[in-house]
Amino acid sequence: MKKLRHLSNKNKQIDREFYETIRDILHHPAVQQMRIYMQHSGTNCYEHCLHVAYFNYRICRRLHLDARSAARAAMVHDLFLYDWRTHKFQTGDATHAFTHPRTAYNNAKRYFDFSEKEEEIITKHMWPVTIVPPKHPETYVIVFTDKFCGFCEFLDYYFGPLREEYRKINKL
Ligand SMILES: [Fe+2]
Ligand SMILES: [Fe+2]
């Protein structure tokens, strides 16, 4: 029991550290604007970036990588600020998957300073779509967490209501 309490306190402390690491980005109006654009299924771009930033932070911290850069870059990795589902029809541009990492970086660098490593984390998060392999291990982490979070968001959208039903029926 003591060990469990210790673990839970440690997790709370890591979560607080995570929040402090991205606080300025999190509350910025441009970043808040991501709430109006949907990303995967029922998740908007802001929520998706927050999920990816959190997993990036936890994984990189555990692996003794640069968790700060991983979290800050992830929080803006999809700051492209348009509805990608209608973008193709409105603009005739069907290259969203290839171009949105650079668009997100160009938008984000207007408001925040990024290191060369953070730039790579943002601009190559879609690798191998973006062909040239990343140099930094933190970029390989976001390549994984971005896909992992997208998959979980998809599952949550389709199976979340079923889970709620199951809980109700079984009075959980
Ligand atoms: Fe993306
Ligand atoms: Fe993403």
Image (cartoon, rainbow, N blue to C red):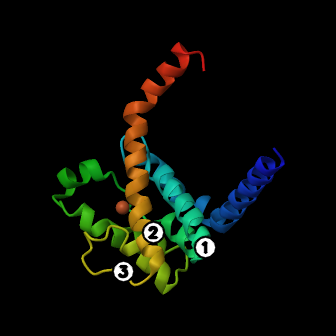
Q: Please state if 102 lies on the left or on the right of 111 as rendered.
A: left
Image quadrant containing the C terminus:
top right
Task: Say whether disc 2 or disc 1 marks the residue closer to the N-terminus.
Answer: 1
Mark 2: which amino acid?
Answer: Val
Q: Please state if 47 lies on the left or on the right of 5 as rendered.
A: left
Mark 3: which amino acid?
Answer: Pro
Number of the front mark, 2 or 1: 2
Q: CA distance from mark 3 to mark 1?
A: 18 Å
Task: Note whether residue 42 is visible.
Answer: yes
Q: Residue at x 76, y 48 (%)?
A: 4
Q: Residue at x 40, y 63 (%)?
A: 144
Question: What label does residue 134 carry, if any?
Answer: 3
The residue that disc 1 covers is 68
Instruction: Check mark 3 vs ligand 1: CB closer than 8 Å? yes or no.
Output: no
Res 68 quadrant in image: bottom right
Task: Say whether disc 3 or disc 1 marks the residue closer to the N-terminus.
Answer: 1
Percent coordinates x, y for residue 24 in the rendering: 64, 66
Percent coordinates x, y for residue 71 in the rendering: 56, 67
The residue that disc 2 covers is 141
Q: CA distance from mark 2 to mark 1?
A: 13 Å
